[in-house]
Amino acid sequence: MKKLLIIISVFLAFSACSELEDLNVNVKDFAEVSGESLYNGATLQFINQMSTEDVNRNLLLMWMQHFANTTYPDESRYDMTTRGVPNTTSNTMYRLVLVNYQEAARVLETQPLAGISQARRDNQLAIVEIMTVFAWSYVFENFGDMPYSQALDFSFPTPVYDDGLTVYKDLISRLNTAMEDLTLTEAGMPAGYDNIFGGTAEGTAKWYKFANTLKLRMGLMLSDVDNSYSKTVVEEAAPNVFVQGDLMTMNYLSASPNQNQQYVDLVASGRDDYVVTSNIIDAMQPTNPAPEHSILSVTVTDPRLGFYAIPVVGSNPPVYLGGAQGQANSYAAFSHVNPIHLTANRPWIIMDYTEAEFLLAEAVERGFSVGGTAEAHYINAVKSSIVFWGGTNAQADAYLAQPSVAYATAFSDWKQKIGTQAWLAYWLRGNTIWNSYRRLDYPRLFAPPDYKQEIDKVPVRLFYPVNEQTLNADNYEAASLKIGGDFPLTRLFFDKEIY
């Protein structure tokens, strides 16, 4: 009897331990995540990072002087420290985007085909790789030299910083390989997992065009540092870029947490933090006399003005009035972003035909063989932007006929012609404007009063994440020394023009 009691006690003890261990099992969350889900989540984080107006994450529409602050103007004055924008940007890109793209590719490579062809799986892997290249280009365009070769390997807790030019060329090679792996007659991601081009065979063809347009832009980014290489890249990409009607957007949903990020920041937040700047409003309507540092003087109101912004609330007759850059502005006294842009499910533009045409105009001016004339591409870009935002062809023609806008007479420098109109066209796309501005050095943008950290011009990079100074000190110091100092005005590997 005693032996029997011992056996029963041992059995009950093991049974109790087993039941306690079961309590540690999370039965609500997924035990495994599909490659498609990882890709989809990383893409949402990436596009949100590029489009957000949260002053803790992205300051570019203020730096590019489309938006001015109301109560808190320090971010327009180039304060990156208080909000920790470099840290947040780096953490988002490495931890939430790039690692998940890497894991998405790993899972897709081993995930059962489950009724799809190998060609479609290859398309899925190629799409992940295209977006990975896009994400890496964003990192290096923002910071300069950054961890790359050791960055996503957990066996390197203090990764080295890789040379920006070398990495950028490697990314273009990776982009070429990804495009070669696409089968344009096959679909891509399953339904619901591609919120950009949809996942059909038609969507795959759009991915191919986007990759070429990205390649065109990346090639031009290197034109001042390696013209021969840039020429080859640009001429390879040009025949297959976006054409009229092509548009790449992140297609958001009405319900949180998948809402348009600018709606979240400007509406759902319940805050009135931004007005449109006088810099862009004065460049879009006739003003007499022209303001100091006027970017563009026009005699015909830009047809896009009424689609970008709204008149000052209560003004009669309606008046468009922009806030002062770098100053505290009354929300009630100035024009606001047009509410048509601020709905929860509003698609956000990542890249479009307008940008492709501006890039081709630039390529022609640089002497690259991409077809057409710089003037024709410029006209196509301006007209497509005006029509896209709601203007008519007749309005576009009248706008383009002005001496200050017409390609033959606008400015003596082709960079100023293209750069100024690109700045006007890339509405709500801070990073796209910043790349164009740094590459062309136009339009001329001036630092606001009371600028921070002795930055007397518009910043041309984010400084390195502050925590790198303690967590990865040796590599941080080496990288800072190599690029010429960890300062917001340090020109990066692609950015050689100084004015």
Image (spheres, helix red, strand yellow):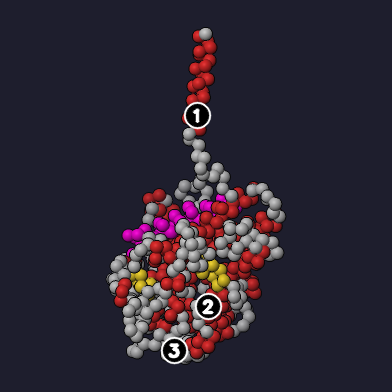
Label 1 sits on residue = 19
Among numbered discs 1 and 3, the one appearing first in the sequence: 1
The location of residue 495, given as percent across then percent down, is 47, 70
Tell me whether the residue at label 2 lies in contact with that at label 1, contact meaning CB atoms closer than 8 angstroms. no
Magenta stretch: includes residue 154: no
Quadrant of the image occupied by residue 270:
bottom left
Amino acid type for the residue under numbered disc 1: Glu
Taking the view exactly as shown, the residue that stands out farthest to the top is: 1
The location of residue 250, given as percent across then percent down, is 53, 65
Work out whether residue 188 or residue 450 is closer to the camera in this orientation and state it: 188
User: Tag 3's secondary structure?
Assistant: loop
Residue interval drawn in magenta? 79-106
Among numbered discs 2 and 1, the one appearing first in the sequence: 1
Quadrant of the image occupied by residue 82:
bottom left
User: In the displayed structure, would residue 338 be above or below residue 187?
Assistant: below
Q: Residues within 10 Å of mark 1 (few under 14, many from 20)?
A: few
Tell me whether the residue at label 2 lies in contact with that at label 3, contact meaning CB atoms closer than 8 angstroms. no
Residue drawn at (29%, 73%) of the image = 330
The location of residue 235, given as percent across then percent down, is 62, 74
Residue drawn at (61%, 60%) of the image = 127
What is the CA distance from the residue labelled 2 to the residue labelled 3?
Answer: 19 Å
Residue drawn at (47%, 59%) of the image = 255
Q: Is residue 125 visible?
A: yes
Label 2 sits on residue = 388
User: Tag 1's secondary structure?
Assistant: helix
Q: Which mark is residue 300?
A: 3
